[in-house]
Image: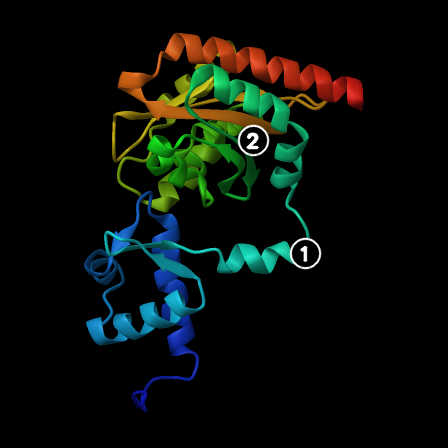
């Protein structure tokens, strides 16, 4: 099929990245219709783009006919070696396995990567695969318990977080400065961040920090599950015990 002669040579690539950004920024897989509504491309153009992106593994078409990011870009970055979060998750794997066995929830470890959180070392049961999917790709800091916890414990001012999350213009984003300040203060007192999903209030993520000698946490261990199946008090206590053991062991090893 011939390309529209009025279209610049780089236009298909630009459109491909627009589609990838929409899929990456979504907390759930998107159908072709949902993508079309967000990017406002002709259906014929979108069909061609999705075929190419699927062929190279940049996106994956699920059985539900919705699309999510594939492993194409992670395979490219793997050539440059493991990321910090992957190396860190491997170093604390025994602790993650022990936590997973004790809480029977999805367990992962996350670090800040710019304005997003990157996860690695995710452990989950088959029935929790849908929940674990949220940890497969980087997510905006305001949509993650790990992101909020690491920002609350860092040297960044809470107003900076407010400005960043407001700029995203995502429905449900926590953009009220007073609310952000109260949440960050609560995280500072308890050492734990707890966040329910914007799209499914039954899903909850909890995170606790791991310190490697500095005042600010270097990473966070996350536990996620459904509210009906998760004893928040027990999970919180076990999570704090785990990150305490991780911090102590890493300090001794260092």
Q: Quadrant of residue 144?
A: top left
What residue is at 46 percent from the left and 20 percent from the top? 184
Q: Check the picture and name the quadrant holding the C terminus.
A: top right
| Nearest to viewer (mark 2 / mark 1) | 1
The N terminus sits in image quarter: bottom left
> Which label's residue is closer to the chain start, 2 or 1?
1
**Left or right, 79 with reference to 126:** right
Disc 1 on helix, strand or loop?
loop
Specify the farthest residue to the front: 126
Percent coordinates x, y for residue 97 in the rendering: 55, 24
Front-most of residues 116 and 101: 101
How packed mark 1 is, by other alpha carbons closer than 10 Å (few <14, some 14-19, many 20 or more), is few
Mark 2, secondary structure of its residue: loop
Spot occupied by residue 119 in the image (x, y as percentages of width and height):
52, 38
Q: Residues within 10 Å of mark 2 (few under 14, many from 20)?
A: few
Relative to residue 92, is residue 199 drawn left or right? left
Tell me which residue sits at (60%, 21%) in the image. Answer: 95
Give the camera-side residue of 15 and 131. Answer: 131
Q: Which residue was labeled with disc 1?
A: 80
Q: At 65% from the left edge and 22% from the top edge, which residue is drawn? A: 211
Visible residue check, residue 217: no
> 120 or 164, which lies in front?
120
Disc sitting over residue 156 in the figure: 2
Residue 71 visible in this rendered orientation of the protein: yes
Image spot of residue 135 (x, y percent): 44, 38
What colouring does the structure picture have?
Answer: rainbow
Residue located 53% across and 25% down the image = 221
Q: Is residue 226 above or below residue 161?
A: above
Quadrant in the picture for residue 250: top right
Whether pointer 2 and pointer 1 mark residues with C-beta atoms closer than 8 Å, the reply is no
């Amino acid at each position: 099929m011939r390309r529209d002669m009025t279209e610049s040579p780089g236009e298909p690539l630009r459109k491909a990245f627009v589609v990838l950004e929409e899929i990456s920024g979504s907390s759930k897989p998107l159908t072709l219709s949902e993508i079309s509504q967000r990017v406002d491309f002709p259906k014929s153009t979108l069909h061609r783009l999705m075929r190419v992106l699927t062929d190279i593994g940049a996106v994956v078409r699920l059985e539900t006919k919705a699309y999510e990011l594939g492993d194409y870009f992670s395979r490219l970055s793997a050539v440059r070696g493991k990321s910090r979060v992957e190396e860190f998750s491997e170093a604390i794997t025994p602790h993650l396995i022990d936590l997973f066995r004790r809480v029977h929830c999805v367990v992962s470890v996350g670090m800040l990567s710019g304005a997003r959180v990157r996860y690695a070392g995710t452990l989950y049961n088959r029935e929790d695969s849908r929940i674990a999917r949220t940890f497969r790709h980087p997510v905006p800091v305001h949509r993650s318990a790990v992101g909020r916890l690491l920002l609350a414990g860092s040297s960044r001012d809470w107003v900076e977080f407010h400005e960043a999350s407001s700029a995203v213009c995502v429905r449900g984003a926590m953009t009220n400065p007073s609310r952000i300040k109260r949440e960050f203060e609560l995280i500072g007192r308890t050492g734990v961040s707890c966040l329910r999903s914007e799209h499914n209030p039954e899903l909850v993520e909890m995170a606790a920090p791991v310190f490697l000698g500095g005042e600010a946490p270097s990473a966070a261990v996350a536990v996620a599950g459904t509210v009906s199946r998760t004893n928040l008090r027990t999970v919180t206590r076990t999570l704090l015990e785990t990150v305490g053991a991780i911090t102590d062991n890493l300090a001794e090893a260092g």
